[in-house]
Image (cartoon, rainbow, N blue to C red):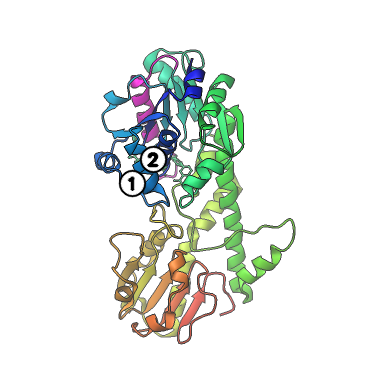
Amino acid sequence: MLEKMIEERTAEIAVIGLGYIGLPTAIMFANAGFRVIGYEIREKVVEKINSGKAHIIEPEIDELLRKAIESGNLKATSNPEEIREKDVYIICVQTPLKEDKTPNLSYLESAVETVAKAMKKGSLIIIESTVPPLTTVKMAELIEAITGLKPGEDFYMVHAPERVMPGRIFKELIYNSRIFGGITPESAELAEKLYRSFVKGQTFKTNSTVSEVVKLMENTFRDVNIALANEFAFLAHQYGINVFEAIELANTHPRVKIHVPGIGVGGHCLPKDPHLLVWPAKEDFGLIKLAREINDSMPLFTKDLLFEALRTINLPPEEAVVVILGLAYKGNSDDTRNSPAFAFMDAINEEVKEVRTYDPFVKGTHESIEDAVKGADAIVIATDHTAFKSLDWEELGKLMRNRILIDGRHIVEDPPKGFIFKGLGRGEY
Ligand SMILES: NC(=O)c1ccc[n+]([C@@H]2O[C@H](COP(=O)([O-])OP(=O)(O)OC[C@H]3O[C@@H](n4cnc5c(N)ncnc54)[C@H](O)[C@@H]3O)[C@@H](O)[C@H]2O)c1
């Protein structure tokens, strides 16, 4: 019956958690013709969405959200009563780490409990959140404990990991390939049919533990490779070379693809997913943990570059005014979660006179770059926003007391005249 409702697009969907992943997903299903209700615990977010405005910055989102709201297919709510007896529940809540780097699954458990209380026999429950291996099966058991319904017999359950990148979410939702890991083959089959309503990329079916591991391996692969690139950057400083030139040349080899070094790895996913991958395992995994440590050390390495530059002009750190350019963890985004800019700020905060910030995408930073750099001694680039690439450094330098430029993101190709320049991985200067 659910299969037919999916084909006819009469299945009713509840999306739990309307953040970077949940809101675009809810919009896609609504615009594909399904009736979608978004359940979100932050009431301000609900109000904003219902007024047709997105609370996150993402290309195309305002237009697509307006279309979904105006068609009557999408509505947001904070009232759990409004998500009762839906055919499909898609859980998109955050799965962060605790202070001790172990997973904080409290948001997921609370979302699963909400779903268990609202669902009916025959519902399809999909977890899009990134979770440690074996979690989907455990969440199915939690639902059974609350409802008495048998997983795979009385309800369907799937892990359908999300692989989109902020800034390209709506394109990638359509064109990325997707994996549907069911607790039973029928569960995966139904989820695949559902997402086929808008996904044009390839789709694959497997079991839920494989799909959990696949998602975590993808981000761990990237994290470990970034750590390797960062280690190459350290070496470049030892040997007095530009690591970016070396990487470009090495990457002309047909089977080599070295990643990009930088001030650190941020965002909701990369810093945590390697921890989620190894957490349930019985043994310790050295390479994955070491890669995390290397990437976490990059803000401190950037601090060393700054302090080295301050020494060359004999300016004690406690007299220095430092401007951090970019707080977002990635270019052209407002997302500051786990941004290495903050780790860098924490590393220098107590030791310098003043830290100022400027990020055109992030509220609460200086209004203009000119305002931020006036009378400052050093600028540290922490985000590769496109706008930073065309800055007139020499003009900005005229507003500064001392002219130090530290590039943590390889934004500046040629060191500007009159500046003491140090680039991460740029050992030649
Ligand atoms: N952001 C990304 O680029 C990305 C990419 C791939 C995968 N993921 C994964 O997707 C998941 C969601 O990430 P996100 O970036 O959308 O997180 P987010 O923090 O932007 O959104 C989560 C939302 O869920 C809400 N929420 C929390 N608990 C709730 C509950 N019990 N009931 C209802 N709403 C609740 C929060 O208020 C928030 O609005 C995570 O597991 C993440 O690892 C994220």
Q: Earlier in the sequence, mark 1 or mark 2?
A: 2
Vertical placement of residue 198 versus 411, above or below: above
Pointer 1 and pointer 2: residues touching (CB < 8 Å)?
A: yes
Q: Position of residue 409 (x, y in %)?
A: 50, 66
Of residues 288 and 154, the one nearer the viewer is 154
Ligand 1 within 8 Å of the CB at mark 2 = yes
Crowd band around label 1 with a 10 angstrom C-alpha radius: few (<14), some (14–19), many (20+)? many
Query: Residue at coordinates 42% horizontally, 71% vertically from top-left?
Result: 380
Q: Position of residue 27 (x, y in %)?
A: 40, 38
Q: Secondary structure at mark 1?
A: loop
Is residue 119 highlighted in magenta?
yes
Of residues 131 and 289, the one nearer the viewer is 131
| Left or right relative to 179: residue 136 | left
Query: Residue at coordinates 50% horizontally, 39% vertically from top-left?
Result: 162
> Magenta span covers which residues?
95-122
Residue 44 got which mark? none
Is residue 19 in view from this perspective? no
* CA distance for labels 1 and 2: 8 Å
Please name the amino acid that badge 2 sits on. Leu
Q: Which residue is mark 2?
A: 23
Vertical placement of residue 218 versus 230, above or below: above
Is residue 303 highlighted in magenta?
no
Ligand 1 within 8 Å of the CB at mark 1 = no
Q: Which residue is mark 1?
A: 54
Q: Position of residue 7 (x, y in %)?
A: 51, 23
Q: Which quarter holds ligand 1?
A: top left
